[in-house]
């Protein structure tokens, strides 16, 4: 997959997450949008996929950030002092054997979903589910090869997963991409997966 990366300033020694306050003008006023940085979190790593995707949980006030390097999700909080701090970490690799990188995270209704690819290119990946408050592992569902992005349906009953199906280095394995639809309406422990 070819990805275009935005230029970055090499004077910074670490990847960081910045939370910005978005202020929108009233609907009757001309469109105006303002961003004001509120806080920043430094992972301590640079150029190593240590902070790529972030999701906010309004129930807990926590921010969940993919740390692909460690196959985990960093859990951040914004205390009254205004500085983001890591308050926990979900170690997906410890809960789901055989996974490589965590590629995406989404949160809905107090449930965290993490898309994780298999260590072996071409093998099926998983979506691991966690409780946003306790960070406890709630279960996992097998999806297609190379799950790279996921999102909840507006009602929180479904999780939609884009599976890239990327080839390995010598192109001897090249699974087709797919979309997995995970029905969690009966709970994540009784998830039903359809692959399209």
Image (tube, rainbow, N blue to C red):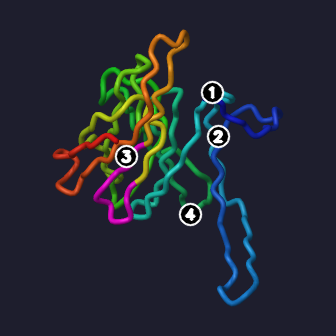
Dot in front, 4 or 1: 1
List the residue tagged with mark 2. 42
Q: Mark 4 or mark 3: which comes first in sequence?
A: 4
Q: Mark 3 or mark 1: which comes first in sequence?
A: 1
Query: Height in image: 52 above or below 99?
Result: below
Q: Are marks 4 and 2 in contact (CB under 8 Å)?
A: no
Dot in front, 2 or 1: 1
Q: Mark 4 or mark 2: which comes first in sequence?
A: 2
Question: How far apart in space, not on screen, are marks 3 and 2 (Cα)?
Answer: 23 Å
In terms of image quadrants, where is residue 100?
top left
- Tell me if residue 47 is in the magenta stretch: no
Q: Are marks 4 and 1 in contact (CB under 8 Å)?
A: no
Q: Position of residue 132 (x, y in %)?
A: 35, 52
List the residue tagged with mark 3. 113
The quadrant in which the C terminus is found is top left
Count residues near mark 4 (Cα–Cα under 10 Å), then give few for <14, some for 14-19, many for 20+. few
Q: Mark 4 or mark 1: which comes first in sequence?
A: 1
Q: Position of residue 30 (x, y in %)?
A: 76, 83
Residue depicted at 39% across the width and 38% down the height: 90
The residue lying toward the viewer, choosing from 173 and 92, is 173
Dot in front, 4 or 2: 2
| Secondary structure beneath label 3 | strand
Question: How far apart in space, not on screen, are marks 2 and 1 (Cα)?
Answer: 13 Å
Q: What range is drawn magenta here? A: 152-161
Query: Height in image: 164 above or below 159?
Result: above
Question: How far apart in space, not on screen, are marks 4 and 1 (Cα)?
Answer: 30 Å
List the residue tagged with mark 1. 48
Q: Mark 3 or mark 2: which comes first in sequence?
A: 2
In terms of image quadrants, where is residue 53?
top right
Q: Which mark is residue 80?
A: 4
């Amino acid at each position: 997959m070819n990805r275009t990366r935005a230029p970055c300033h090499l004077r910074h020694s670490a990847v960081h997450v910045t939370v910005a306050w978005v202020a929108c003008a009233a609907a009757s006023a001309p469109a105006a949008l303002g961003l004001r940085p509120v806080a920043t979190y430094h992972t301590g790593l640079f150029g190593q996929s240590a902070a790529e995707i972030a999701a906010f949980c309004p129930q807990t006030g926590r921010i969940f950030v993919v740390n692909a390097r460690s196959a985990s999700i960093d859990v951040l909080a914004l205390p009254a002092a205004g500085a983001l701090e890591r308050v926990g970490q979900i170690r997906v690799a410890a809960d789901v054997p055989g996974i490589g990188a965590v590629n995406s995270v989404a949160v809905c209704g107090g449930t965290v979903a993490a898309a994780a690819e298999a260590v072996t290119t071409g093998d099926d990946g998983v979506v691991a589910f966690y409780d946003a408050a306790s960070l406890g592992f709630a279960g996992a569902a097998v999806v297609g090869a190379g799950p790279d992005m996921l999102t909840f349906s507006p009602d929180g009953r479904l999780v939609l997963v884009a599976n890239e199906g990327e080839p390995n280095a010598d192109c001897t394995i090249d699974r087709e991409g797919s979309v997995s639809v995970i029905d969690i309406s009966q709970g994540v422990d009784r998830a039903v997966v359809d692959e399209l």
